[in-house]
Image: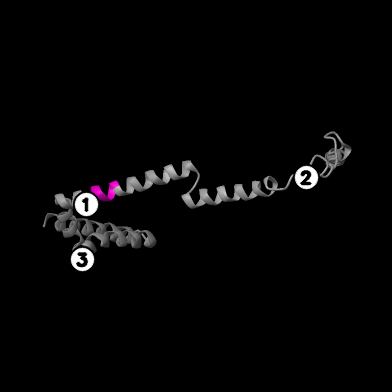
Amino acid sequence: MLAETVCSAVSAAGLGIAAVTAYRRRFLTAARILAYSLVPIGLVLTGAVEWAVDTAFSPSAWLGFGLLGGAWLLFMTTRVVERRRGGTRKERKAAQAAQREAVAPAASAPSLGPGSRPAAQPATKPKAAGSGDDFSDIEAILKKHGI
């Protein structure tokens, strides 16, 4: 009963503020205030306020909220632990299988003796860090500006 009265008073005050705002020719703001002021009376008419009051003073409802909070906390804790370990169990098994497949072909190749391995090919030398190609763009920019 008290909650319905408070909601009705809030809606009436909101309607008054919306009327004053519309009188000042701020119609968009007045429409927004009107929308906010209709929410409390709408909650009263749908019965949501009565449900909220009954829920607020019900021990079984608070127990239910506590259980929901505990379940959420447990779920979030397991997610944090899962991320620290590096993914789900399926993802870890897939990564282990990929590692075994990557190692297996070289490990299972038959050993035919010391002369059976192909000769190592010489690696190509990378360009030196101080080569002229690296600074040609910079030199062009400096010459353009007369430096």
Q: Disc 1 to disc 3, how far (Cα)?
A: 23 Å
Q: Which element carries disc 2, helix, strand or loop?
A: loop
Type of the residue with mark 3: Thr
Residue corresponding to mark 1: 64
Crowding near the residue tagged with mark 1, few <14, some 14–19, many ≥20 C-alpha atoms within 10 Å: few
Above or below 26: residue 97? above
Residue 15: assigned label: none
Label 3, label 2: how far apart the Cα atoms are:
85 Å
Q: Is residue 135 left or right of residue 82?
A: right
Which kind of residue does numbered mark 2 sit on? Answer: Leu
- Quarter of the image holding residue 132? top right
**Quick one: label 2, few (<14), some, or many (20+) residues within 10 Å?**
few
Residue lying at 24% horizontally and 50% vertically, measured from the top left: 65
**Residue 114 in view in this figure:** yes
> Which residue is under mark 3?
46
**Residue closest to the eye, 147 or 106:** 106
Three-letter code, disc 1: Gly
**Residues shaded magenta:** 65-70
Residue at the front extreme, as displayed:
113
Which badge, 1 or 3, comes first in the chain's sequence? 3
Give the crowd class for mark 3: few <14, some 14-19, many >=20 residues within 10 Å: few
| Mark 1 element type | helix
Q: Quadrant of residue 121?
A: top right
Of marks 1 and 3, the one in the foreground:
1
Of marks 3 and 2, which one's residue comes earlier in the chain? 3
Numbered mark located on residue 112 in the image: 2
Membership of 81 in magenta stretch: no
Where residue 45 appears, as percent x and y from the top left, is: 19, 66
